[in-house]
Image: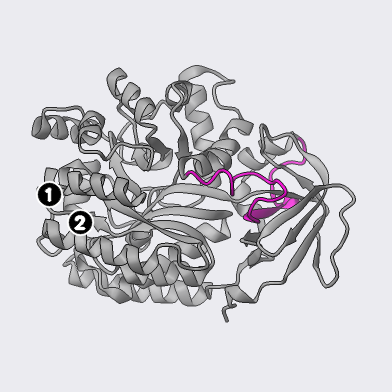
Amino acid sequence: MTWNVAAGPISTVIRGATLLPLVESARALSGDLVISGSRITHVGPNAAIPPGADVLERRGHYVMPGLIQTHLHLVQTIFRGLAEDLTLLDWLRRRIWPLEAAHDADSVRASVRLGLVEVLGTGTTTIVDMGTTKHGDVVGEELVRSGIRALFGQAMMDTGEGAPPELLETTRASLDASAALHKRWHKSGNGRIQYAYSPRFALSCTRELLEAVGTLAKMNDVAIHTHTNEDPAERAAIQAATGRAPITYLAEMGIASERTVAAHGVHVDDAELATLRETRTAITHCPTSNLKLGAGIADVVRLRGSRVTVGLGADGAACNNRLDGFEEARIASLLARSLHGQRALTASDALLMATRDGARALHLDEELGTLEPGKRADLIVLDAGRLAGPMGDPATRILFGGGGRAVRDVFVDGVGIVRDGTVRTIDAAEARAKAFEATTALMQRASLA
């Protein structure tokens, strides 16, 4: 059974919890949080209870902003375990692109629904998602239904060595498809859903396509979501094809800009780092994906120290194989310590990256990313009894004690999307069953069974 996202209460009071506003640090306070409509109206002790409010007694719990994952591929959720032990370009050419080419509307829907169950159930309230080159309407439908907040885009590919013909588009068809999807889905779901142009990466897009996206995004003030500087072989191939370092090339195309979220940024030279800073391009750190594909370790301390905004993302289940944003924050902290020492990226820093900095990357920090009166009520409640403990400051307990497994309640725009650990907008058992059916048929179509 699923629940209509429009049916949420007018007011909710979360009582007696430990609150982590994450405004400047992970300093905690005890008290109550009040939601009126889609907004937070009180954070702290002695909350007045509005008439008719839904009161949740949550003593022994933590309340914090919902996680913001700034790079995902929900259409790859059902590829989990089907593209193992490969480096990036082989992973794409031998497994991922053939699997995406075999997607139909039913398998895309099943993959997206299963992914949404996982990200919502582990405390993510906002995502930036890149689909494949077809069935973008299916993705939009499921995002609206789920109640999550999202920027999403249909992947754009008009070239690419090793890409199946079924996956490639003409330049004009790619631009037209994105224009139509933008018209249908931008600001849908009561404003929760936004559209983002999604040129996959420099090796799968012609110069003509990239230049057009750069121009259209600037003209229409639309976000851009892409990949860059992920893997040494990918970087070398882009340099050979363009005569430019990847980020330098994207800047020349108008893709690197203040509207852009670029996944990975693992191998960035000094000139590119300056370009990221000057163009205000945001980077998404995807530590598990980078480690699993053997791509390297992004130096987020160096990026952040150069005033580049860095968010976090799980990437996709085909290269992670989990979608838990807390796990990405944990690994990000551990990797930074291994590069720069124990205080390089503390538990508090990592939680700020997963919330406030993700909101900054999307230019939504006036609305999201912290618990403050007036901000949108995108927040999560964690059962401290399900965390490793009981000692330690809250940020440390949450980050290193398994934050994703402790999620009890999730709110987006004040609506309870997860209650008592159960996603209310998607039937999880049905989503898993449909995903199994869809994966079996997909593998047969892709000749990978």
Furthest residue toward bottom:
1
Circle 2: element type: helix
Q: Single out the mark in the foreground, 1 or 2.
A: 1
State the image coordinates of residue 400 (x, y, percent, origin top left): 62, 38
Labels 1 and 2 touching (C-beta < 8 A): yes
Q: Which residue is drawn at 26% across and 50% down?
A: 216
Sort mark 1 into few (<14), some (14-19) or many (20+) by Cα contacts within 10 Å.
Answer: some
- Report the span colored magenta: 363-391
Classify residue 144 as left or right of residue 372: left
Tell me the number on the disc at residue 97. 2
For mark 1, what is the residue?
160
Q: Inspect the image, locate mark 2, and give the three-letter code of the amino acid beneath it.
A: Trp
Give the prevailing secondary structure in the magenta stretch. loop
In-front residue for pair 419/430: 419
**In the image, residue 176 lies in the stretch drawn in magenta:** no
In-front residue for pair 247/387: 247
Circle 1: element type: loop
